[in-house]
């Protein structure tokens, strides 16, 4: 393997697979994509209902938060994907864009080009929407967006009941308005998961200028004269060094990218020195102000129409044959 590339992309998740695809589209460039996890060979990744079982270390970092004061000091589970496709290979496949105001706020704070009107063309470029082709949705893009093959009876009843009390049905919460009750769009193709790996990386793998290496854990960004010139990463066999002719691109996610920066000496100087890391660049914001929502849900016993009932041996066996033969049944669902 060549140890010098034009671009080094760290992390083959939601962003990394897209970046590797777009950069390698230029045959005059060379691109190295590194992923700490393995290939997305686990069949549970590709069967929609399988995401409920994707909690093991071979595909999931298994992070937890620090104790949360607002949650009675409990630690909260914080899963992150560790395989090709990253968290898009272990999530529930729900396709929801941010609200227009979120993007416009970013632009107002100084992030030029990140307003809603600036990002919408890229959503449309990436999308192959099976339901819509209009001023909010694209066709012919790499990422397939569709409706779930079938929905649970309770889901349908919930949507109807919301309308009965006056909540309007919204056929497209990724369009002009977000208010209302809806049935989620999902990132699936032919009743299989559509991850960033299947959508963006798989078509690019045939390019000779793209190298993908799995089981490669980035340990340090190499900096010279204030510029990132390469990367150290660890494989099962050894600690490797690779150089970047143009750029090093970190796409390891909201946890692993700042972690790698700080391990490389880029971050709050006093905190780095306190743990024995040589400071390369004092950048106080790295690793700060991280916010995310928690997945909080209510569990209740119901009549036997829930997905839990489908986990019984006989029903599970029939559902498996139904999925393999007809691409229908509970295995096509993302629990909705």
Image: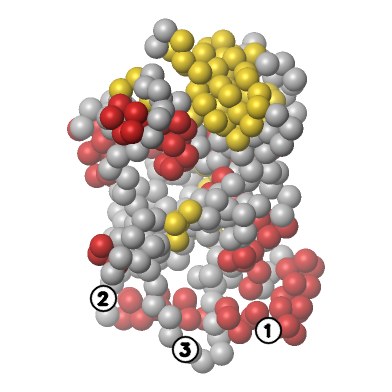
**Crowd class of label 3 (few under 14; some 14 to 19; many from 20; radius 10 Å):** few
Which numbered dot is residue 312? 1
The mark nearer the N terminus, 2 or 3, is 2
Vertically, is 187 above or below 335? above
The mark nearer the N terminus, 3 or 1, is 3
Q: Residue at x 55, y 17 (%)?
A: 230
Closer-to-camera residue (279/316): 279
Residue 313 horizontal side relative to residue 183, left or right: right
Closer-to-camera residue (235/295): 235
Chosen colour scheme: secondary structure
* Picture quarter with the N terminus: top right
From the image, tell me which residue sits under label 2.
166
Q: Position of residue 248 (x, y in %)?
A: 51, 21
Q: Residue at x 47, y 76 (%)?
A: 155
Give the CA distance from mark 2 to mark 1.
37 Å
Vertically, is 77 above or below 306? above
Residue 266 horizontal side relative to residue 185, left or right: left
Which numbered dot is residue 224? none
Residue 221 horizontal side relative to residue 205, left or right: left
Q: Position of residue 316 (x, y in %)?
A: 71, 78
Give the CA distance from mark 3 to mark 1.
16 Å
Q: Secondary structure at mark 1?
A: loop
Q: Position of residue 171 (x, y in %)?
A: 40, 61
Which numbered dot is residue 301? 3
Q: Residue at x 57, y 31 (%)?
A: 218
Give the CA distance from mark 2 to mark 3.
26 Å
């Amino acid at each position: 393997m060549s140890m010098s590339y034009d671009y080094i992309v760290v992390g083959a998740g939601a962003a990394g697979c897209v970046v590797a695809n777009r950069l390698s589209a230029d045959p005059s460039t060379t691109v190295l994509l590194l992923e700490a996890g393995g290939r997305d060979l686990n069949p549970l990744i590709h069967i929609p209902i399988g995401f409920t079982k994707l909690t093991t270390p071979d595909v999931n970092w298994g992070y937890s938060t620090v104790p949360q004061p607002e949650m009675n000091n409990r630690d909260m589970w914080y899963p992150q994907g560790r395989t090709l496709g990253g968290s898009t290979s272990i999530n529930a496949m729900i396709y929801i864009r941010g609200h227009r105001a979120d993007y416009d706020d970013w632009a107002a704070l100084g992030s030029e080009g990140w307003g809603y009107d600036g990002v919408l063309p890229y959503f449309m470029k990436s999308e192959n929407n099976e339901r819509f082709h209009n001023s909010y949705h694209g066709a012919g893009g790499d990422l397939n967006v569709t409706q779930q093959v079938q929905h649970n009876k309770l889901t349908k009843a919930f949507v109807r009941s919301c309308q009965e009390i006056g909540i309007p049905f919204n056929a497209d919460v990724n369009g002009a308005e977000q208010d209302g009750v809806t049935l989620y769009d999902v990132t699936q193709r032919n009743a299989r998961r559509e991850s960033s790996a299947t959508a963006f990386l798989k078509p690019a793998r045939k390019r000779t200028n793209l190298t993908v290496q799995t089981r490669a854990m980035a340990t340090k960004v190499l900096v010279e004269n204030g510029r990132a010139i390469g990367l150290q990463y660890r494989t099962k066999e050894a600690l490797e060094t690779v150089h970047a002719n143009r750029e090093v691109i970190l796409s390891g996610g909201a946890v692993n990218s700042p972690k790698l920066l700080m391990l490389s000496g880029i971050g709050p100087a006093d905190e780095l020195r306190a743990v024995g890391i040589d400071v390369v660049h004092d950048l106080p914001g790295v690793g700060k102000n991280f916010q995310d929502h928690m997945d909080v849900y209510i569990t209740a016993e119901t009549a036997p129409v829930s997905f839990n009932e489908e986990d019984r041996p006989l029903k599970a066996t029939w559902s498996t044959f139904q999925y393999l033969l007809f691409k229908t049944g509970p295995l096509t669902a993302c629990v909705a």
